[in-house]
Image (cartoon, helix red, strand yellow):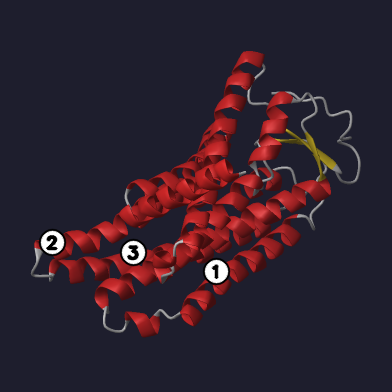
Amino acid sequence: MSVNCSLWPENSLSVKRFAFAKFSEVPGECFLLFTLILLMFLVSLTGNTLIALAIFTSRALHTPMYFFLVNLSLLEIGYTCSVIPKMLQSLMSEFQGISRKGCATQMFFFTFFAITECSLLAAMAFDRYMAICSPLQYATRMSHGVCAHLAMVSWGMGCIVGLGQTNFIFSLDFCGPCEIDHFFCDLPPLLALACGDTSQNEAAVFVVAVLCISSPFLLIISSYVRILIAVLMMPSPEGRHKALSTCSSHLLVVTLFYGSGSITYLRPKASHSPGMDKLLALFYTAVTSMLNPIIYSLRNKEVKAALRRTLGLRKVLSRNR
């Protein structure tokens, strides 16, 4: 779809502002999509905030598994806030532009949170592996210091990759056209606007995807293969059920996140289509962030109990006011 590019001259040395492609020319469709995405955004923020508060305020949940869950909830809040507000503005505004610096900032935070989530999901899988396969050594091997170290490595990895990729992409010149065929500043659609040969940049994006997305995924698979072997060797059906139930929520979140992310970034370039890329991006930026707190709260009795206590406490405080 065409966008008025008068503010983004295509013949200049480098485009200083970008425009996002419109979702639709029909106002009714844009309003419907705005309402749907806003609802998912609010559900995501509310759900992840409540889970973080419930775990913080419940001493019974101050364990490694829930420590990582708090990190995941905080990460999801940042993840959605880096993309969704600008998307909502673009849906309802005639001016759909973003400055070069604003685009670089959005790309950094999106990459930062995405890579951090990959590493954090691997750390959560390792935690489940230690709890089920080495229960006698779990307390010492997954101490507070070890958990904090794993979390810092996850956030640090995301920061390093985010800074590196953003600097690498925005060291290029963008000669036009000005329109990003996406709803946020993602790597592939921006590379399509760059001047000259971008094969090295595309190779770098693929290498980072393999190292920072596929490697944690392989660690997750390895952990769950060992978990499955250990569970199958358990003599008690109740023990097997309890062990698997502690992993089910994490496995579902991993499937949702890695399924959409891998299809987007690891499939061949020739098979990419803007429509499919936008649909997948909407799924892993809005839908999964909304579903994660629902998955963990519905499938975990301890989290549900903590949420009830947190909501009950808030009601009492509001009455006292």
At 73% from the left and 56% from the top, the residue drawn is 169
Most extreme residue toward the left, as rendered?
235
For label 1, the residue is 154
Most extreme residue toward the front, as rendered?
320
Q: Is residue 83 visible?
A: yes
Are the two marked residues, 3 and 1, in contact with CB atoms closer than 8 angstroms? no
Q: Position of residue 206 (x, y in %)?
A: 56, 58
At 67% from the left and 58% from the top, the residue drawn is 201
Of the image marks 3 and 2, the number of the one nearer the N terminus: 3
Residue 251's quadrant in the figure?
A: bottom left
Of badges 3 and 1, the one in the foreground is: 1
Amino acid, disc 2: Glu
Label 3 CA crowd tier, 10 Å (few <14, some 14–19, many 20+): some
For label 2, the residue is 238
At 47% from the left and 46% from the top, the residue drawn is 311
Of badges 2 and 1, the one in the foreground is: 2
For label 3, the residue is 221
- In the rendered view, tell whether residue 27 sits above or below residue 33: above
**Which image quarter is the C terminus in?**
top right
At 27% from the left and 78% from the top, the residue drawn is 135
Which element carries disc 3, helix, strand or loop? Answer: helix
Quote the CA–CA distance across marks 3 and 2.
Answer: 24 Å
Which element carries disc 2, helix, strand or loop? Answer: helix
**Which image quarter is the N terminus in?**
top right
Q: Nearer the viewer, residue 108 or 135?
A: 135
Which element carries disc 1, helix, strand or loop? Answer: helix
Q: Position of residue 253 (x, y in %)?
A: 40, 51
